Image (cartoon, helix red, strand yellow):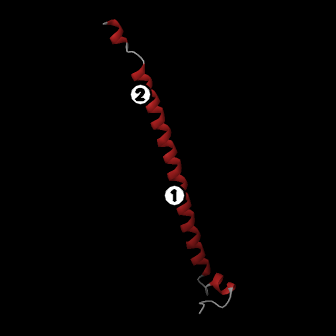
Amino acid sequence: MMAFESLAELVSMGSHGPYVWTAWGATLGFLLLSVILVRGESRGVRRTLRRRLRRDAAVTSSPSEDQDEG
């Protein structure tokens, strides 16, 4: 048994259609925005960690000036 007789009834949902579909759209929009922002933040963190690892590797692989003088 279907709750709505036609697609037009489903879309209009009585007089509640605009509210319902706006709420669905806003929810979907916020979820997509959340995923996009998290992915961007994750890329930034990974980029920062890669830079730190390269910097630390360069520091530990090059001889320090203190050891050369002693």
62 left or right, relative to 4: left
The residue that mark 1 highlights is 34
For the residue labelled by badge 1, is the local secondary structure a helix, a strand or a loop? helix
Q: Is residue 18 above or below residue 68?
A: below
Judge the density around disc 1: few (<14), some (14-19), many (≥20) Cα neighbours within 10 Å.
few
- Residue 37 location (% of width, % of height): 52, 52
Q: Earlier in the sequence, mark 2 or mark 1?
A: 1
| Residue 67 falls left or right of residue 40 | left
Locate the N terminus by quadrant: bottom right
Residue type at mark 1: give it: Ser
Picture coordinates of residue 21 (x, y %)? 60, 75
Please give the label number shown on residue 50. none
Give SS at disc 2: helix
- Furthest toward the bottom, the residue is 1
Q: Is residue 47 above or below residue 33?
A: above
**Residue 24 place in picture, x, y as percent:** 57, 72
Q: Nearer the viewer, residue 54 or 40?
A: 54
- The residue positioned 57% from the left and 77% from the top of the image is 20
Q: Determine crowd level at label 2: few under 14, some 14-19, many 20+ residues with C-alpha closer than 10 A.
A: few
Q: Amino acid at mark 2?
A: Asp
Q: Quadrant of residue 36?
A: bottom right
Residue displayed at 54% across by 68% down: 27
Question: Up-down: is 10 above or below 54?
Answer: below
Q: Residue furthest top?
A: 69
Whether pointer 2 and pointer 1 mark residues with C-beta atoms closer than 8 Å, the reply is no
In percent of the image, x 66 and y 91: which residue is there? 5
- Front-most of residues 25 and 55: 55
Tell me the distance, in whole angstroms, between the alpha carbons under discs 2 and 1.
33 Å
Q: Which residue is mark 2?
A: 56
Q: Is residue 9 above or below residue 51?
A: below
Instruction: Where is residue 3? Give x, y as percent.
Output: 59, 90
